[in-house]
Image (tube, helix red, strand yellow):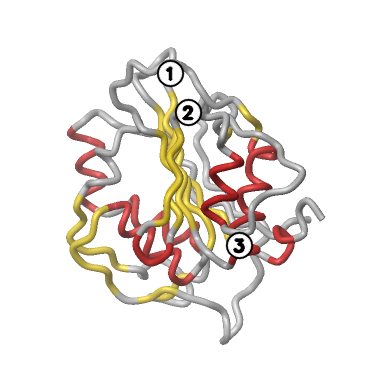
Amino acid sequence: MLRITVGLLVALIASSGQNQRGGVSYRIGLPPVMMVLSRAHVSGSLEYWGVCNAGLDFPKLQSLQKIADAPVDALREIFLNNPNMQVKEGPHGIIRMVERDVPEDLLALKIKRISFGGEYVPPNVIYDPGSALRVILSTPEVVAYMKAHDLGPPPGYQTVIEGQSLPSPESPRISGNLDNVTLSEALDYVLRTFPGLWIYENCPSDTRNRSVLFVFYQNAPEWSLVGK
């Protein structure tokens, strides 16, 4: 079984006039992306329009028998059939995969302080990106923004953490405070301790204006074996 960490799946609502995209099962779309990141030992972020009717789905991509060695080139090949997807290397070597028309309002939200601790055991220490995501999305700024813009999770949203093991003294961890960052910068900060991929999926809705899913996946040796 692949060792993965899936963070908090949170659906938020806002206005959208986009056509439906995505619809590719994450079981098909996720492995090649994680294979590229894990083999190159780099992290990435993925922002796109999807469906969200049954949880996480992926944007349009193609299956390749052989892909480029350079991770940016490899990911561009994977998303070659998606004309809206831009792939480039950003600050700190994080590879950005972003569809051109994805709304950035939430990611650009400024957060005064994020305190990684409190309700977790042991206190003030976080051992997985899912818990870190839960802290980030629970900050007063995010909560207030959601309330002010009538944003909120739909019935049935849930936290999913898979493949976790008990922490050891050597386990990676996040502690302390992070000050004056945007939401996207906070997600990048988590990648420094837990290399992998954060996902920001936007979806149209029949009952609401827009849904958004946030998810983390960690790099792992098992991903490197995909396609071999």
Q: Is residue 120 left or right of residue 219?
A: left
Specify which label sits upstream in the sequence, 1 or 3. 1
Specify which label sits upstream in the sequence, 1 or 2. 2
| Crowd class of label 3 (few under 14; some 14 to 19; many from 20; radius 10 Å) | many
Residue 152 vertical position relative to residue 215 in the rendered view, above or below: above
Distance from Cα at disc 1 to Cα at disc 2: 23 Å
Q: Position of residue 190 (x, y in %)?
A: 42, 64
Q: Position of residue 139 (x, y in %)?
A: 27, 54
**In front of the other: 5 or 75:** 75
Reading the image, the residue beneath label 3 is: 219
Q: What residue type is disc 2 on?
A: Pro
Q: Quadrant of the N terminus?
A: bottom right
Q: Quadrant of the C terminus?
A: bottom right
Q: Residue at x 28, y 22 (%)?
A: 15
Distance from Cα at disc 1 to Cα at disc 3: 31 Å
Residue 35 vertical position relative to residue 167 in the rendered view, above or below: above
Q: What residue type is disc 1 on?
A: Ser
Q: Secondary structure at mark 3?
A: loop
Query: Cβ–Cβ below 8 Å for labels 1 and 3?
Result: no
Q: Residue at x 60, y 50 (%)?
A: 74
Q: Position of residue 205 (x, y in %)?
A: 43, 18
Image disc number at residue 205:
1
Residue lying furthest top: 206
Q: Secondary structure at mark 1?
A: loop
Reading the image, the residue beneath label 2 is: 83
Q: For residue 180, what is the image quadrant? A: bottom left
| Crowd class of label 2 (few under 14; some 14 to 19; many from 20; radius 10 Å) | few
